[in-house]
Image (spheres, helix red, strand yellow):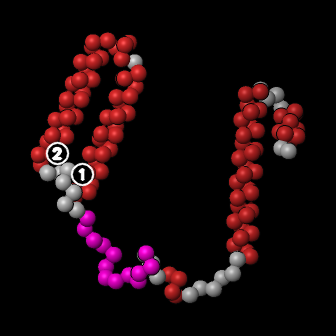
Amino acid sequence: MLWPIVSAVTRFAAVSDFLRSYLTVGIFGGVALALVAGILGLASLIRPTRPQESKYVNYESGVDPVGVGWSQAEIRYYIFALLFVLFDVEAVFIFPWATRLEAYGAFGAVEMGIFIVVLALGLLYAWRKGVLRWM
């Protein structure tokens, strides 16, 4: 559909195939943006507008808001999530190592052992401090 436009634009100028492919992507992107803008503009023109004060009240879980919206969260949830991310990243490092263990040899096994011991010490420290208790 748009290819005749691209070929007409590039026919008169000495444009390489490399730049022609970028021009194609640019034209498709421009058409996509114009389509989105057109649809949003049309929707704003034909939608009904009935402003009501009750539409602008905060609403959460079907309950009308009572009191202030600020509450202090306990730090243990943050630490628990941080520990999850830490050990999730550990898994990201262990999987590639496990697939190439033969190539790394004894040196790679020792290095990964040290890595796991350091993470285990961190887990032991968090366990001793009571961070892993959910209550």
The magenta stretch is: 61-73
Q: CA distance from mark 2 to mark 1?
A: 9 Å
- Residue 47, relative to residue 117: is it above or below? below
Q: On residue 79, which mark appears?
A: 1
Residue 59 appears left or right of 133: right
In screen coordinates, is 27 left or right of 74? right
* Rendering coords of residue 68 (x, y %): 31, 79
Q: Nearer the viewer, residue 107 or 12?
A: 107
Residue 95 locus on image (x, y percent): 38, 28
Q: How many marks?
A: 2
- Which image quadrant for residue 104? top left
Residue 9 visible in image: no
Prevailing secondary structure class for the magenta stretch in the rendered image: loop
Left or right, 119 with respect to 101, comes to left
Query: Type of residue at label 2?
Result: Ala
Q: Which is more toward the observer, 100 or 30?
A: 100
The reply to whether the magenta stretch includes residue 56 is no
Q: Is residue 20 above or below residue 81?
A: above
Q: Residue at x 27, y 54 (%)?
A: 78
- Classify the position of the N terminus by image quarter: top right
Secondary structure of residue under mark 2: helix
Question: Which residue matches tag 2?
Answer: 126
